[in-house]
């Protein structure tokens, strides 16, 4: 979330640095995002892990931010592979 919540960096810098943590699909989805349009600027607390007991290759972490709670979906392709961000879901009512 720290790399996501940076509205003052250029879009090129934002996706280059954030892209290292994203799935291939998320990289494609977020490549044209202008970080200046992201309403969150800071994380205000500790993320809370939500495990999907039916899916060993996916989980969610909910982060409190100055724009509300963001849900970050993490995926991995195998048990021995690293977790990658697949989606950032903003709080209801924000874009």
Image: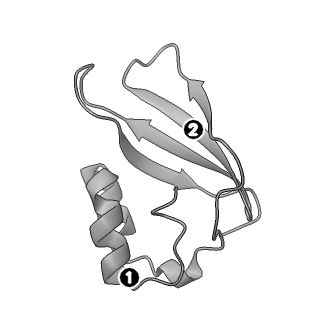
Q: Position of residue 75 (x, y in %)?
A: 37, 35
Task: State the image quarter where residue 9 is shown.
Answer: bottom left
Look at the picture and state if 1 lies above or below 6: above
Residue drawn where x is 48% and y is 14% of the image: 54
Circle 2 Cα neighbour tier, 10 Å, few/some/many (<14 / 14–19 / ≥20): some
The spot of residue 71 in percent (x, y) is: 60, 46
User: Disc count in the image?
Assistant: 2
User: Image quadrant for the C terminus?
Assistant: bottom right
> Residue 46 location, x and y as percent?
66, 42
In front of the other: 24 or 49: 49
Q: CA distance from mark 2 to mark 1?
A: 24 Å
* Residue 43 x %, y %: 65, 57
Observer-nearest of 75 and 66: 66
| Residue extending farthest front | 45
The residue lying at 63 percent from left, 71 percent from top is: 41
In the image, 71: left or right of 44? Answer: left
Rendered image: mark on residue 11: 1
**Labelled disc at residue 60:** none
Q: Nearer the viewer, residue 6 or 59?
A: 6
| Residue drawn at x 45%, y 63% as measured from the top left | 3
Q: Which label is found at residue 61?
A: 2
Q: Residue at x 77, y 64 (%)?
A: 93
């Amino acid at each position: 979330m720290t790399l996501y919540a940076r509205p003052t960096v250029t879009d090129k810098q934002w996706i280059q640095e954030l892209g290292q943590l994203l799935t291939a699909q998320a990289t494609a989805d977020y490549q044209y995002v202008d970080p200046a349009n992201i309403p969150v600027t800071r994380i205000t607390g500790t993320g809370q892990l939500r495990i999907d007991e039916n899916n060993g290759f996916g989980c969610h972490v909910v982060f409190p931010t100055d724009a509300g709670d963001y849900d970050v979906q993490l995926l991995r392709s195998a048990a021995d592979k690293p977790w990658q961000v697949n989606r950032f879901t903003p709080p209801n009512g924000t874009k």
